[in-house]
Amino acid sequence: MPSWLITTLVVIAAVILLFLIAGYLKAPPDTAYIISGPFKKRILIGKAGWRMPFFERVDKISLRVMQVDVKTSEAVPTNEFINVNVDGVANVKVSSNPELLKKAAESLLGMNQTELVSLVTQVLEGNMREIVGSVGLKEMVQDRQGVAKKITENVVPDMEKLGIEVVNFNIQNFKDNAGTIENMGIDNVEQIRKNAQIAKANAQRDIAIATSHAQEEANAVKVEAEKKIAEQNTALSVQQAELKVQADTKKAAADAAYSIQQENQRKTIEIAKTEADIAKKEKESELADKAIVLKEKQLDAEIRKQADANNYRIAKEAEAELIKRQKDAEAERFATEQEAAAKKYQAMMEAEAKRAEAEALRYAMEQEAEGIRAKGLAEAEAIEKKAEAQNEKVKPYIDAVLTFEELQALFDSRDMDITALEEGVLDNASYFGRIFARSGGLTDAVAQGLKEQEIDFALKACTCDGIEACRVALLKKSKNLLDANFIEGMACIGGCIGGAGCLTHGEKNKAEVDKYGREAMEKTITDAISMLK
């Protein structure tokens, strides 16, 4: 290949390469490149492209947000004919929407930012004056956002004709030379002060009424409690009398048993005496036999047979009589023993039955008295809590004190059946915030709080289950006999779940409280507190 041909091809390739390089474009994301020429108009935003050098031109339009201060050049009358001056600020930009961008290219191409801001300001001011003239002064002051929204909605069509997008518009200030706005504020302040004084007077009236009602209820409960105490004392006296009757009955039964025992001993003595008589007769018979033997030696052979026969007959008769008397005595003794044992057993069974009946009656009366006492204590504690709520130190922090009966009465007055309501899940308390109702819950919460806060404190807790346990713990602590630095006292056995207001009592209630605690979404105290921030 000739060298001139190679040189020509290299020159042509270099020209083509330079031509391509000269036409390469890369538009940033905040600027629109508008390519125009003999071909179709093209727009580049945040991407690369190519234009034909010498035949097509490139114009640039900024898409950055511009802040425009809008102020009315002179006072504008509202629909109430009150002249006001309005200050506002708007953020606008050339829209990147292809249709609106074409309009911007036709209307704004070649303008610098100052000229563009001046144009936008005039359009915004005109629309602002139009909207201000259609609303009242009170609406402008109380609903700035609503007025600004109206101005924005009104100016958007005009801005779209220029290819401009309104990002946001806010009203900063309203002014009037006549002081109308200030007078409106004074009127509102006086109205608020008036309403506050009325509310205070109503609250003081309600407090006085509530205090009177609480005192009336407290007196009624006190009278009822004294009445129940008197009834309990009467019942106790009756019970003591019945127990005395039962004790006398048992004493009489014991005396009867003693008499029966004496009778048995007498019969035993008589049986022994009878046996002694039998032994005596046996001894006399033995002596008689010896006498007969002696007499036999003296008798001659003539009368020996007759004597033997007589002796044999006498001996057999005596033996039969002895056996008969022994059998009769044994039979009488056995019958006497059986009769005495039967009577003794019957007396013991009757005494045991009466004792069991007395114990059951005593236990039932004790349980009834304990129930009345527990209810009286609960009602007395409710009265004490209501009175405590009136203490000046705690009164500002308490809205109301209600007993379970009063709370139920409120539900009933609204025809509300809480058992028919759908159960909801509480998720704003931790496990340790849910177990306060059972004994030991407060101690667990304190220990957990020390652990989470990393407080170096050796907790020695004493959990008191019931009012008696509380009394004993406080007494020991006052005598320095209790090695504890924290005492949790529950007046009700088992905690609040063991109080008179609960329908059921026992370990099942504690298990239900612990189960409810484990269902908490926040497992720690810190997690629960963070939900409130």
Image (spheres, grey):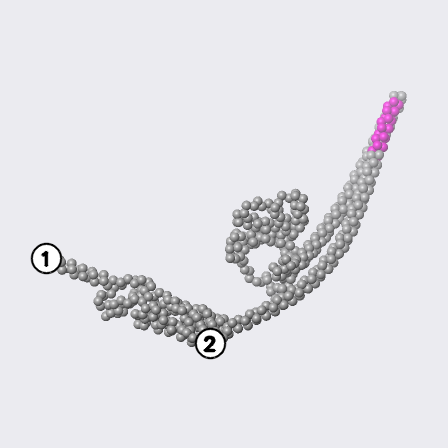
Q: Name the disc covering residue 2, or none.
A: 1
Q: Name the disc covering residue 83, or none.
A: 2
Nearer-N-terminus badge (2/1):
1
- Indicate the amino acid at tag 1: Pro
Determine whether, in the image, residue 243 is placed left or right of residue 430: right
Secondary structure under tag 2 reads strand
Q: Residue at x 54, y 60 (%)?
A: 424
Q: Nearer the viewer, residue 319 or 148?
A: 148
The answer to whether any part of residue 245 appears in the image is yes
Magenta stretch prevailing secondary structure? helix
Q: Nearer the viewer, mark 2 or mark 1?
A: 2
- Indicate the amino acid at tag 2: Asn
Determine whether, in the image, residue 201 is placed left or right of residue 428: right
Q: Is residue 197 above or below residue 322?
A: below
Determine whether, in the image, residue 133 is placed left or right of residue 453: left
Q: Residues within 10 Å of mark 1 (few under 14, many from 20)?
A: few
Q: Nearer the viewer, residue 367 or 111?
A: 111
- Residue 44 in magenta stretch: no
Give the magenta part as a residue range: 274-295
Residue 111 coordinates in the image, percent (x, y): 31, 70
Q: Residue at x 86, y 26 (%)?
A: 287
Q: Nearer the viewer, residue 352 or 432?
A: 432
